[in-house]
Amino acid sequence: MYSGAFYGATGNQNVTGLSSAKSVWNRSGRAVRVFSGAGGTGTSQCFAAGVQSASVSVSAGSVRFLTTTSC
């Protein structure tokens, strides 16, 4: 069963309702960078367009969609 959050593929967005991601599916046509802090602060991890990662451990404070398809 899926439980989590969906984000539209635009700009920077703070994550609400969860503190970490255990899996990531980037269904957008753009790469996305997940930051540990709000407003694009802290450490980050990037996921290319179309990437599915079934087992990750990423602190999630905010997300930023990039203008490219790769990291």
Image (cartoon, rainbow, N blue to C red):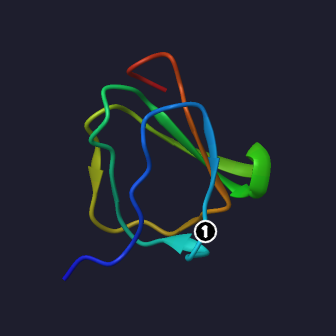
Point 49% across, 26% down: residue? 71
- Position of 42 compared to 36: left or right? right
Figure disc tally: 1
Q: Is residue 3 above or below residue 29?
A: below
At mark 1, the secondary structure is loop
Instruction: In the displayed orientation, state which residue is furthest to the bottom.
Output: 1
Point 31% across, 34% down: residue? 28
Point 56% across, 76% down: residue? 17
Mark 1 crowd level (few <14, some 14–19, many ≥20, 10 Å Cα)? few
From the viewer's side, name the closer residue of 60 and 17: 17
What amino acid does circle 1 point to?
Answer: Thr
Image quarter in which the N terminus is found: bottom left
Q: Is residue 68 above or below residue 18?
A: above
Instruction: Name the spot of residue 20 as percent of width and height, x first.
Output: 56, 72
- Position of 44 compared to 1: left or right? right
Instruction: In the displayed orientation, state which residue is furthest to the left.
Output: 1
Instruction: Name the spot of residue 4 as percent of width and height, x first.
Output: 39, 72
Instruction: Name the spot of residue 46 as percent of width and height, x first.
Output: 52, 40
Residue identifier under label 1: 16
From the viewer's side, name the closer residue of 51 and 11: 11
Instruction: Name the spot of residue 12 as percent of width and height, x first.
Output: 64, 38
Instruction: In the displayed orientation, state which residue is furthest to the top.
Output: 68
Point 53% across, 25% down: residue? 66
From the viewer's side, name the closer residue of 42 and 10: 10
